[in-house]
Amino acid sequence: MPEAPKEDNAPEAPTAPVEKVAEGDAEPEPVKTVSGLPHRRFTPISISAPGEVKPVVSLEKREAETLTQERLEELWKELIERSRDNEKLYELLADKKVELKNNNLFTIQVPNLYFDSQLRNHQTEILGFLREKTSNEALNYKAVVFVEQVERKAYMPREKFEAMVNVNPSMLTLRKLFPDIDF
């Protein structure tokens, strides 16, 4: 097929000029972009409070800390102290036991499923703090419902007698001496 003739007044695709640096120049001039504005490198910043600007933490990978049970408990206490302003989070974290299973997983003992669902609501805050402190992005938790076995109270006469026998086994010999006594 024959090629269509090119029109002279058709616009060409814009190209960025190539920067040429002389060997003696220490600092090159900024490269001009297609729009004609100089290309600038921006430093990422984080705004934490009105009027206060902080540079973002370095994105360099730090070596992940080897987590121990003692270090986990120390970080857990620090997290509880930091959450004193947030009453719901504080009540959720306070008096909960944490146990390290391996370097990337720990368990939180909760009394019921309600606390488990509330922990999931605050998961980003909890894991964000712990991951930042340990430099371990793989760190995760598992909530374990731990119900304490409450001793059942004796109501019936037979149950009361069995409870007394548990405290004082000589009650059985007394019962044998007086067989006609009902409980």
Image (cartoon, rainbow, N blue to C red):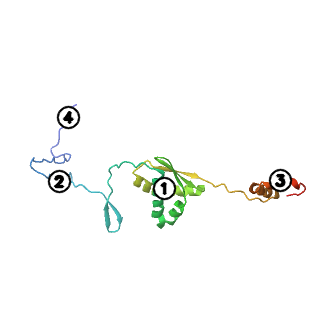
Toward the top, the furthest residue is 1
Give the residue at mark 3. 173
Task: Tell me if 8 is positioned left or right of 175 in this view.
Answer: left
Q: Position of residue 83 (x, y in %)?
A: 47, 63
Of the residues tagged 3 and 2, which is closer to the observer? 3
Specify the quadrant of the image occupied by residue 7. Answer: top left
Disc 4, SS: loop
Q: Position of residue 45 (x, y in %)?
A: 31, 59
Q: Which class describes the residues within 10 Å of circle 2: few (<14), some (14-19), or many (20+)?
A: few
Contact between labelled residues 1 and 2, with CB atoms less than 8 Å apart = no
Of the residues tagged 2 and 4, which is closer to the observer? 2
Residue nearest the viewer, comparing 182 with 107: 182
Give the residue at mark 2. 30
- Position of the N terminus, as image quadrant, is top left
Disc 1, SS: helix
Task: Tell me if 70 is positioned left or right of 31 in this view.
Answer: right
Question: Tag 2 or tag 3, which sits nearer the N-term?
Answer: 2
Disc 2, SS: loop
Q: Amino acid at mark 3?
A: Thr
Contact between labelled residues 1 and 3, with CB atoms less than 8 Å apart = no
Give the residue at mark 4. 3
**Numbered disc total:** 4
Question: Tag 1 or tag 3, which sits nearer the N-term?
Answer: 1
Q: Position of residue 59 (x, y in %)?
A: 33, 52
* Residue appearing at x 32%, y 54% in the figure: 58
Of the residues tagged 3 and 1, which is closer to the observer? 3
- Position of the C terminus, as image quadrant, is bottom right
Give the residue at mark 1. 73
